[in-house]
Image (spheres, grey):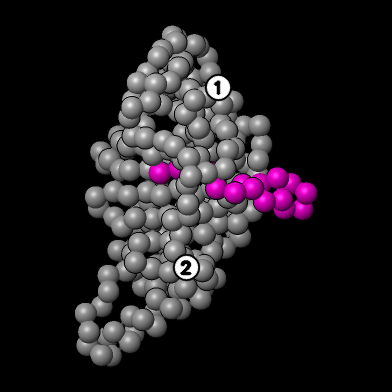
Amino acid sequence: MFKVFRPACLLAGFLALAVFVPAQEIPGQKPMVVIAETFQFLPGTWAEYTILDKEKNETYRFHFAVMTKEIVKGIPCWWIEIEVESAANPVVVTRFLAEETPNGPGDLKKAVVQVEGYSPFTIPAGFLRGDDAEVGQVRQAHIVKRLEERSITHAGKTISAVVVEAEDEDARRMTATVSLELPPIALFSCEDETIRMSVNDWGTGATSKIKGPAMPFFLWIMEQVTAGTEDSKSKKPVKKHPFN
């Protein structure tokens, strides 16, 4: 089974009401393919990809890392981080605590976002749960055919991989090259009608890309409004808001 995992997504219109910026998507909120049968919860493992969003004709860098394990009310969970960088937007890091399941990351317990140049903030719980959740959305698919086995050398590493074809619940097909020797996602490449992704490198020893303590979301909003007001009064150039 495949999952397309979406990192933290906040409603831009909701943010616009609070910080007076044009309604639009927050940068860094891109879907990510996760192969359920082969996902590995190995602490410190990371993989970095180049992803082409075919619908927007945009390319971006996607860094995915499994951090540390935590038990929440008897349920094993893992801190996971996703960093996204594109030419048009600042770097965005999403750190979330997700349940460990046989199919990869499950329900989210907590999540933190940091936009480059700004303090990190916690995502309100309402964006983590329910059918309308804006964090952790997935598109599931199942493997319908194993096409061929391959030995691949990339970034100075040689791995054994399998090319498969998968289909999601909307009958959309994707082709992927997977390998258990490429944790944590075990994905070398993937392509469907909306995205094309390929690995740049992978390894161990991942460290957090979140800098500084996270603050509550509404306190973060107040901090941005206050900073903007002070800049205006002092006639200093107003720092561009991260969601502009």
The residue tagged with tag 1: helix, strand or loop? strand
Q: Main secondary structure of the magenta part?
A: strand
Left or right side of 112 for 176: left
- Residue farthest bottom in this picture: 233
Circle 1 residues within 10 Å: few <14, some 14–19, many ≥20: some
Q: Does 198 appear above or below 44?
A: above
Mark 2 belongs to which amino acid?
Answer: Gly
Q: Is residue 132 visible?
A: no
Q: Which of 172/26 is in front?
A: 26
User: Looking at the image, how many numbered discs can be counted on the residues?
Assistant: 2
Q: Which of 59/204 is in front?
A: 204
Q: Does 219 appear above or below 140?
A: below
**Where does label 2 land, which residue?**
212
**Where does label 1 land, which residue?**
142
Left or right side of 228 for 3: right
- Residue farthest right in this picture: 74
Identify the residue shown where x is 49% and y is 25%. 181
Q: Between marks 1 and 2, how big is the CA–CA gap?
A: 40 Å
